[in-house]
């Protein structure tokens, strides 16, 4: 039997779920497709081997986009009942957008899953993203011109705050061990998305279900050529013939993420050495010190400072690069003045200092 067709054994599942053992409750995101069906099956078997064991809650999101969705959610509920797991179906209500449908549906799904986790007093939501999904994500982000953070693909552990805007503050909850393998400490009350299958190919999950005699649904949107990810998925066999396999793309993502983590650690160290306080209302950087630093470190320092001072959301990489290049050109040319705004922050060059402060309110022209 080929390696890709070997079912996931209990001992392997124990390793995949090991950092969840001390959780009081865990939410499972289950659509009814092969990957998430394998997730609920393997999680249920793992739970039965734990003493004590976390409570498991399977949550299915009905986006209201396909008539089959209700039937699929009902099938997941029946399977959950057989496995002894509680189940809820949550619906994305309201009018659906005419553009950017997949992105908006994903954001709605994450909001509903986070709400379900809060209601269940769970710190972790498990998703069934696989190695194949990781490879497609790397290709998608390469096509979009992403930086290292994007090409690094999906992390095993991601805060929901990075996926969708935060909910109104909830009552503080104790920090848990969930996702400690992600190399980051979670904040009290934070809900994180955990992807235990990122190192597994989809074929192995399908083989696991086949061995257990469990059926699953297929979402037609996964092969719908209207969607970029579906078109990239169709290209994967062709790329694999040239050596660009899912394994190699996922390996690239791990290497890039390792480099990204190293750069961020250097930026963190440098920021502390420079005495930059992210809670300050105004930051000043010595232009001569910055000129001696590698451009990417300067770019990241500026991005951090603008993100901390500004009030207009995330700093877009392309716009940040344009600002950084303009600032570098001004300093190289000996310019005494430079002023630009980005993401609600104003960056100005004043003598020997680069000042980052809150941008003044935008002027609105009156119509008349």
Image (cartoon, rainbow, N blue to C red):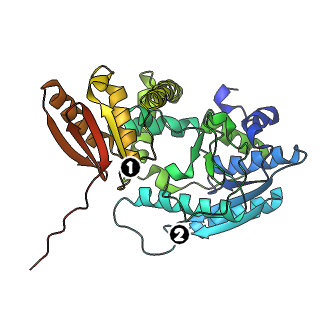
Q: Quadrant of the C terminus?
A: bottom left
Q: Residues within 10 Å of mark 1 (few under 14, many from 20)?
A: few
- Name the residue at the left extreme: 368
Task: Give the answer, above or below, for where 208 lies relative to 104.
Answer: above
- Name the residue at the right extreme: 51
Q: Position of residue 155 (x, y in %)?
A: 55, 38
Q: Position of residue 353 (x, y in %)?
A: 26, 33
- Name the residue at the front extreme: 351
Describe residue 54's horizontal placement relative to residue 128 as left or right. Answer: right
235 and 263: which one is in front? 263
Q: Quadrant of the N terminus?
A: top right
Q: How much space separates mark 1 and mark 2, taking CA atoms? A: 39 Å
31 and 323: which one is in front? 323
Number of labelled discs?
Answer: 2
Q: Please give the name of the residue rendered at 56% of the width and 52% of the height, measured from the top-left corner.
A: 160
Residue matched to label 1: 281
**Residue 268 - label:** none
Q: Position of residue 289 (x, y in %)?
A: 31, 23
Residue matched to label 2: 92
Task: Give the answer, above or below, for where 124 lies relative to 84.
Answer: above
Whether residue 189 is visible to the viewer of this picture, yes or no, is: yes
Q: Residues within 10 Å of mark 2 (few under 14, many from 20)?
A: some
Describe residue 211's horizontal placement relative to residue 364 as left or right. Answer: right
């Amino acid at each position: 039997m080929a390696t890709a067709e070997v079912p996931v054994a209990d001992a392997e599942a124990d390793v995949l779920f090991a950092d969840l053992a001390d959780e009081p409750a865990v939410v499972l995101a289950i659509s009814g497709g092969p990957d998430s069906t394998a997730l609920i099956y393997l999680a249920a078997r793992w739970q039965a081997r734990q003493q004590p064991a976390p409570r498991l809650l399977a949550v299915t999101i009905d986006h209201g986009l396909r008539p089959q969705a209700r039937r699929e959610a009902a099938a997941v509920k029946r399977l959950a009942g057989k496995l002894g797991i509680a189940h809820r179906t949550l619906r994305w209500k309201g009018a659906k957008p005419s553009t950017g449908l997949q992105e908006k549906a994903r954001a709605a799904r994450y909001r509903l899953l986070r709400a379900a986790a809060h209601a269940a007093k769970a710190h972790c939501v498990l998703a069934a993203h696989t190695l194949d999904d990781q490879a497609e994500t790397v290709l998608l982000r390469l096509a979009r011109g992403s930086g290292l953070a994007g090409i690094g693909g999906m992390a095993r552990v991601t805060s929901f705050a990075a996926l969708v805007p935060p909910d109104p503050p909830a009552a503080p909850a104790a920090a848990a061990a969930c996702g400690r393998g992600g190399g980051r400490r979670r904040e009290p009350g934070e809900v994180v998305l955990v992807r235990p299958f990122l190192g597994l190919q989809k074929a192995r999950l399908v083989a696991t279900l086949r061995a257990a005699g469990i059926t699953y649904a297929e979402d037609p949107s996964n092969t719908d050529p209207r969607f970029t990810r579906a078109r990239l998925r169709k290209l994967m066999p062709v790329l694999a013939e040239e050596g660009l396999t899912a394994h190699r793309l996922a390996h690239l993502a791990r290497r890039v993420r390792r480099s990204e983590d190293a750069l961020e650690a250097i930026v963190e160290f440098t920021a502390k050495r420079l005495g930059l306080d992210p809670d300050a209302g105004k930051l000043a950087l010595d232009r001569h010190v910055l000129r001696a630093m590698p451009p990417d470190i300067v770019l990241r320092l500026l991005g951090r400072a603008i993100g901390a001072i500004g009030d207009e959301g995330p700093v877009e990489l392309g716009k940040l690069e344009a600002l950084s290049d303009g600032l570098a050109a001004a300093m190289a040319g000996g310019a005494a003045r430079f002023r630009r705004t980005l993401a609600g922050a104003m960056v100005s060059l004043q003598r020997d200092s680069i000042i980052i402060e809150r941008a003044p309110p935008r002027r609105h022209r009156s119509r008349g």
